[in-house]
Image (spheres, rainbow, N blue to C red):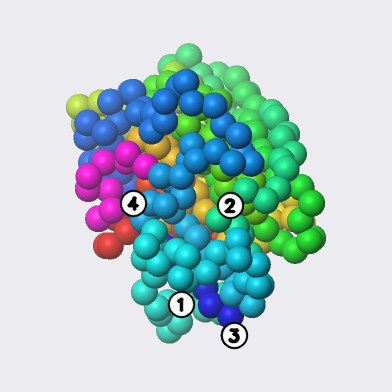
Amino acid sequence: MSELVQVAKTPRWGGRLIRVALLVLGLMSACSGQSPEPYSAATSVDVGESDVAADAASSQDTLVSKDSTSAASADSLTSEDTAARVDTAPAIDTSAPADVGVDVAPTPAPTVFKTAKFKLKETLAVTYAKGLTDANWGAKTGTTTELQLDMWEPQGTDGSLRPALIMIHGGGFKSGTRKNGAIVNICKFFAARGWVSASISYRLLGSKGPIPAGWNTVAAGSKSPDQVRAMYLAARDARAALRWLTANAAKYNVDPNHIAMGGGSAGAYTAIAAGVSFAGDYLDELSDTQDPTLKTTNPNTSASVSAILDFWGGASIPNILEA
């Protein structure tokens, strides 16, 4: 008998409400431009034994999934092992229509481990899509930039599909890179325990890429208009990364039904925006003429997020998940 242990099974609701929430949240102090580091910069990571990311692994924010039919090993996750660390998600409402992102018939959760089991394969600078940058908002000069991610894959697995984790760095939508130490440490921590993980780059405030007219109008009336404009770019790129990983799931041995997304500070906001939005959000608002790079974002791939990890995203951010 199989048992699924997980946290934060996210509801799905309309893109317009998400946008309103994000515009409000974008003005909060949590996105001050300095992404807090949960670990000491002097801490080195040995993915075989280190507890650098133990707080992330033991937090209520962390997704832990387990098929207990494979739990013969004392090291594999069980509900007893995780009882003190995670909350069991409420039962899924299978009566909800499938187009809102609810798993009507969830697949068995892949087996992962609470201690490091695997050596890692690191792949750097993988291009997952392209995006436009401009000198000014709405300039439409259209310089194309490659959007890239770094990946870590567990080696020596039994060939079964792996869950995946996409992590997004913070920086107030103004700064930061996918090389952020805390984000990379979290990716390596989970990859050593059975996940395929990735840290992504996304366009920041200085990119001034194309955004919908409606979004720009609302942003213009905010206290931090450029920061709010940049939220669209971040969510658009994060959704592109999600679709890319889903489209390439077979290549990387990923179970597309078990992809989590998380981040810190601005990255947490972005993970929620990308994770609880509809398929057409951050995609259909612009035409291919307005943004030709949309064609590089796997627009026809259906993809969803099964869990969200919110680190330092603001005190009110969990309200989105309860709405």
Mark 3 or mark 1, which is nearer the start of the sequence?
Answer: 3
Q: Hey, what amino acid is under mark 4?
A: Ile
User: Where does the N terminus fall, quadrant-wise?
Assistant: bottom right
Q: Give coordinates of residue 188: x percent, y percent.
A: 60, 39
Residue at numbered disc 2: 115
Judged from the image, the secondary structure of the residue bearing numbered disc 1 is loop
Label whose residue precedes the other's in the sequence (1 or 4): 4
Residues in magenta, as a range = 311-319
Q: CA distance from mark 4 to mark 2?
A: 36 Å
> Is residue 40 in sight in this rendering?
yes
CA gap, disc 1 to disc 2? 38 Å
Disc 3 marks which amino acid? Answer: Met
**Callout 3: helix, strand or loop?**
loop
Q: Residue at x 35, y 28 (%)?
A: 36
Reply yes or no: does residue 59 show up in magenta: no
Left or right position of 214 against 153? left
The residue that disc 1 covers is 97
State the separation of the CA atoms marked 2 and 3.
24 Å
Q: Are marks 3 and 4 in contact (CB under 8 Å)?
A: no
- Find disc 3 in the rendering and name its residue: 1
Q: Which quarter of the figure has residue 138?
A: top left
Inspect the magenta stretch and tell me whether residue 312 lies in it.
yes
Q: Amino acid at mark 1?
A: Pro
Please rate how many residues cluster around mark 4, counting C-alpha atoms within 10 Å: few if below 14, some from 14 to 19, many from 20: many
Q: Residue at x 37, y 42 (%)?
A: 311
Q: CA distance from mark 1 to mark 3?
A: 27 Å
Amino acid identity at mark 2:
Thr
